[in-house]
Image (tube, rainbow, N blue to C red):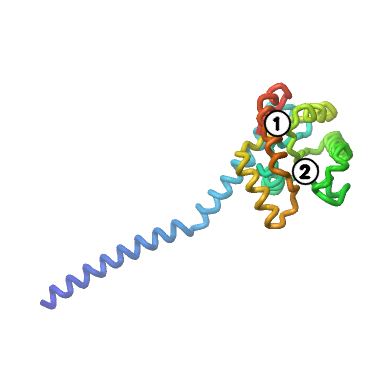
């Protein structure tokens, strides 16, 4: 009888040891830093590589000009900040909203819109002429105005980053940001509807503008 008890005890110890080993392996795989970090780093590098490869067929001696194309609430400004922070700090972001705040004191003040765009154009021209890379953070959905702006830029690598989004989602994002007190333009829903139609037209028109797309 004692021999039987001893055998059962040894078996239970073996089972417990096997279970403990399995649990330890799972915990080790989940927590070991040599695999967890490369996965995150790989995702970051992949995003940055896609951005860098967008202009690889262009003249590498020229500065890069990235124009963002999308309606309000599509994520343009967030993308621009993340791209500069995570991928390429050589880019300078030129934002119509920021220029408008400096000139008018209010991001929603449209009374000096022509002057805002003159300042934006001058900034882009000066940066590109000095060999600096530029991201233009604006909706850029009006094809006529977009093409007129491009004609006044010095030679550069033209790269387009478009932001496709359901307009209902974009409207909800804008409304949520305003509720939270985010410093952003309070664009009326009717204006977003107009810009959405312009965006759809722009998608058809950009093929004639000499862009390399991100």
Query: Toward which corner of the image does residue 123 lie, by quadrant?
Result: top right
In the rendered structure, find residue 76 and report the number of the disc placed on it: none
- Determine the residue located farthest toward the top in the rendered image: 208
Q: Residue furthest left?
A: 1
Q: Residues within 10 Å of mark 2 (few under 14, many from 20)?
A: some
Q: From the viewer's perspective, is the residue at label 1 or at label 2 nearer?
A: 1
* Residue on which the image places disc 2: 93
Horizontal and vertical percent position of residue 70:
69, 37
For marks 1 and 2, the one nearer the N-term is 2
Query: Dot 1 lies on which element?
Result: helix
Q: Nearer the viewer, residue 99 or 65?
A: 99
Q: Could you tell me residue 151's position as x and y percent? A: 82, 26
Residue 118 appears left or right of 24: right
Q: Quadrant of the N terminus?
A: bottom left
Question: Relative to 159, is 35 on the left or the right?
Answer: left
Identify which residue is drawn at 49% across, 58% down: 32
> Measured from the top left, where is residue 41 in percent x and y?
58, 48
Q: Residue furthest bottom?
A: 2
CA neighbours of label 1 inside 10 A, class few (<14), some (14 to 19), many (20+): some
Q: How many marks?
A: 2
Secondary-structure class at tag 2 = strand
Residue where numbered disc 1 is placed: 198
Q: Is residue 98 left or right of residue 8?
A: right
The CA span between labels 1 and 2 is 23 Å
Q: Which residue shows up at 88% across the image and 42% down it?
A: 112
Residue 144 visible: yes
């Amino acid at each position: 009888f004692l021999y039987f008890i001893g055998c059962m005890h040894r078996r239970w110890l073996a089972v417990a040891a096997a279970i403990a080993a399995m649990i330890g392996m799972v915990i080790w795989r989940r927590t070991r830093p040599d695999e967890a970090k490369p996965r995150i780093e790989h995702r970051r590098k992949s995003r940055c590589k896609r951005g860098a490869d967008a202009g690889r067929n262009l003249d590498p001696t020229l500065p890069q000009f990235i124009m963002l194309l999308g309606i309000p609430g599509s994520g343009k400004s967030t993308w621009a900040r993340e791209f500069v922070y995570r991928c390429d700090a050589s880019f300078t972001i030129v934002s119509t909203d920021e220029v408008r705040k400096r000139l008018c004191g209010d991001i929603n003040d449209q009374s000096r819109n022509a002057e805002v765009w003159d300042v934006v154009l001058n900034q882009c021209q000066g940066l590109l002429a000095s060999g600096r890379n530029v991201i233009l953070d604006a909706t850029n959905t009006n094809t006529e105005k977009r093409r007129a702006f491009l004609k006044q830029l010095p030679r550069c690598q033209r790269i387009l980053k478009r932001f496709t989004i359901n307009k209902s989602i974009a409207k909800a994002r804008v409304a949520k940001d305003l509720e939270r007190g985010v410093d952003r333009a309070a664009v009326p829903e009717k204006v977003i509807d107009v810009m959405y139609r312009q965006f759809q037209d722009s998608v058809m028109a950009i093929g004639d503008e000499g862009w390399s797309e991100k």
